[in-house]
Each structure stands twice: as C-alpha cells, then as structure tokens.
Image (cartoon, rainbow, N blue to C red):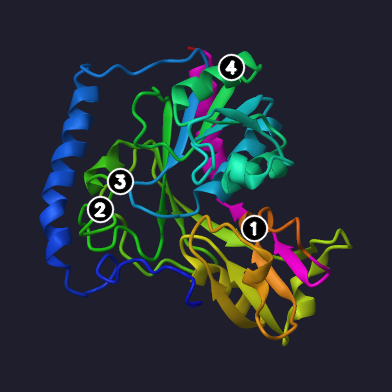
C-alpha cells in the first residue's frame, strides 16, 4: 500500500487488541445513536414523507462496501422499467458541503463529490447533493422524478423510505461486531434485519464467511463486480483488459478498500504496482510521479477527479455490478406494488 493511503484499524477486522480509548468511547457512541433511533421510532423526531417511492442503498458499517456500483445498476434497471429515477446524495468531501446543488457529468468533483459525479456520468439521471436528504428528495420530485434513490443514507432517518437495501462486504462482513470506534459498525448488527434486501458484495470471488447474523426481509443476494475493459482517458478507443495481461501497470485506487481493485486486476494476469490513496482523495498531477512510465489504471471513481491532467498513459477501468435475475424481479415487483398504493 502506498504510504499516502490510509488503513482501516487492524482491530476492526482482525484479532488485534482494541485500544483503551476506543473501548471507552464506544458506550457513549452506542448511547447517542441508540437514543436517536429511539426518538425516530417513537415519533418524537419527525420523519418526512415525499409523494414518490424512496429507495435507500446503504450499509451499517463504516467505509465502502460497493454501494455506488449497485446504485448505478439500480438506476439503470429502473430506467429500463419505465421509471424516471433521481439520485439524492450527501456528496461527501465537497468543498461547499453546506450548499445544495445539481450535479451532472461535467460538475467539478470538488463541488459535486466524486461519487455523485460518477453516478451522473454513468446514468444521465438527475442527481442532487444536499446534506439535507429530505430537501434533496423534494427537489428531485419537483424536477419530474417519480422515484428517488439515495446513495448512502441508511442512517438519515429524517427521510422516510419505502425500501432499504443493505450492502455488506462479503469477506469482511461486520468485522469484530462492535460499534464504532472499537469496531466498524455504525449501528448494531441487528439493524440489518429491518432492511428489505441484503446485497453481499463478493467482488470477483466466492463467499468465505458465514452468513451475516440477521436475515434481511427479502433475502440475501450475492453481487459480483466485473471489469473487462480500460477506457483511455484521452478519448481513444476502449481497450480490452486482456491487452495488459503480462504487463506491469501502476494501479491507482482512492476507495475504501483499494486492495479489492488491485486483486481484480491481478486476477486478469496484470502485474500490479499498487498505489492506494485515502477514500475521496483529491488528486494532483504530482500524485502520479511514480518514477517509472507505465500505463496507469484507475477506478472510475478516481478517474473523474483526474480528467484535467490525464494523458495517453491514463486509463479508467469501468466496474459493473452483477446480481441474480431473481433479485431484480423481486425488487422491481416490490417497487411496482408501492406505486399502486
């Protein structure tokens, strides 16, 4: 891992001892978040309904689990089914995080956030970023959307939702099972049982862990991520990843779990020189001074932040989410029933 990358605490997903400060803070975190959930559950804090179905794609662990690839595929499927979806997001890491804005494929990442810009670029649907997801959802409805998808926001209880989709890492699952900061959980593992669907991100591999502790309402579904091509960032023709097989490349990933991307490239026979950056890293030209001139392969989420200085040596690697056909049948059937109520 590059020295500029950040590591998930070893004790979250391993047997390392938990530092005393983390142990001490966890009961306080549990009390505050538990009180907040109780206030919403009992109606003392208000939830706001909007007049169209709301789907939330989120997780109960800190860090990335594959929500954005799933969101992109979900929006694509909804469009194919005749819906007019819009996406609401907080837009993590934006320079003016307190300001709501519309995001499209050309929005500067420092204003729109890397994931919202990527979603807008890949799907072409309206994307609204706002720390207040209720306001974002209302703006999408006013813009003509008949269904709202929230990229993240499982814990944003102010916005009432009709369907919750939990995404969990198929290999790390819930780690040591402890709440933050002693563990990776934003909420107790039992919270997962209230979600309508659980999607288990296996990357390219097979499940090696036992099923998660609590079963989601409409079942647990496996998701695999697929990479096949590399898109030259100077606009030239798409290349098959097979053309890089047996070659060394600089691989760049500023995501929550960079090793997943590196492993996917290695599985295609590519010699990876890994460069891991912090999640949501803001790139500069100097970040790519690697000391050797090799092709640079990066995730699409990273590539949207490097368009201004990309050269013929830089390639974006599209990622697609694959789920069983039965999952889409079950989900779209559930959405269709909501629309008739």
Say left or right for 85 vs 315: left
The residue wearing badge 1 is: 319
Q: Is residue 105 above or below residue 230?
A: above
Mark 3 or 1, which is nearer the eye? 1
Quadrant in the picture for residue 181 = bottom left
Return the residue at label 2.
Answer: 213
For image coordinates 30% across by 55% down, the residue present is 212
Q: Which element type, helix, strand or loop, lies under badge 4?
A: helix
- Determine which residue is flagged by label 4: 141
Q: Position of residue 133 (x, y in %)?
A: 46, 27
Q: Quadrant of residue 268?
A: bottom right
Residue sitting nearer the eye, 199 or 302: 302
Q: Secondary structure at mark 1?
A: loop
The reply to whether callout 3 and callout 2 are in contact (CB within 8 Å) is no
From the image, tell me which residue sits under label 3.
215
Distance between the alpha carbons at the discs numbered 3 and 4: 32 Å
x, y (%) of residue 191? 26, 41
| CB within 8 Å, label 4 to label 1 | no
Going by the image, does 232 lie left or right of 212?
right
The crowding category of the residue bearing disc 2, from other C-alpha atoms within 10 Å (few below 14, some 14 to 19, many at least 20), is few
Of circles 2 and 1, which is in front? Answer: 1
Disc 2 and disc 4: Cα gap in Å? 36 Å
């Amino acid at each position: 891992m590059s020295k500029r990358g950040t590591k998930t605490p070893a004790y979250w997903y391993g047997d390392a001892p938990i530092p005393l400060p983390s142990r001490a803070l966890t009961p306080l975190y549990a009390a505050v978040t538990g009180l907040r959930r109780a206030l919403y559950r009992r109606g003392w804090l208000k939830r706001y309904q909007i007049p169209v179905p709301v789907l939330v794609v989120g997780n109960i662990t800190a860090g990335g689990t594959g929500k954005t690839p799933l969101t992109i595929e979900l929006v694509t499927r909804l469009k194919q089914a005749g819906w007019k979806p819009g996406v609401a997001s907080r837009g993590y890491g934006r320079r003016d995080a307190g300001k709501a804005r519309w995001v499209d494929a050309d929005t500067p990442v420092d204003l729109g956030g890397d994931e919202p810009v990527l979603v807008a670029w890949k799907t072409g649907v309206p994307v609204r970023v706002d720390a207040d997801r209720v306001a974002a959802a209302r703006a999408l409805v006013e813009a003509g959307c008949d269904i709202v998808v929230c990229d993240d926001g499982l814990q944003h209880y102010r916005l009432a939702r009709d369907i919750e989709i939990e995404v969990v890492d198929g290999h790390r699952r819930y780690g040591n099972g402890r709440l933050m900061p002693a563990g990776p959980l934003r909420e107790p593992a039992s919270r997962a049982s209230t979600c309508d669907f659980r999607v288990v991100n296996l990357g390219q591999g097979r499940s090696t862990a036992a099923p998660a502790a609590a079963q989601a309402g409409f079942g647990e579904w496996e998701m695999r991520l697929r990479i096949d091509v590399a898109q030259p960032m100077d606009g030239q023709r798409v290349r098959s990843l097979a053309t890089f097989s047996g070659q060394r490349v600089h691989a760049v990933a500023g995501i929550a779990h960079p090793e997943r991307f590196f492993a996917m490239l290695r599985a295609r026979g590519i010699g990876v020189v890994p460069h891991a950056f912090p999640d949501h890293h803001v790139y500069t030209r100097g970040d790519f001074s690697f000391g050797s001139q090799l092709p640079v392969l990066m995730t699409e989420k990273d590539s949207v932040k490097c368009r201004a200085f990309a050269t013929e040596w830089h390639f974006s690697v599209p990622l697609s989410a694959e789920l069983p056909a039965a999952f889409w049948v079950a989900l779209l059937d559930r959405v269709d029933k909501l629309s008739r109520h």
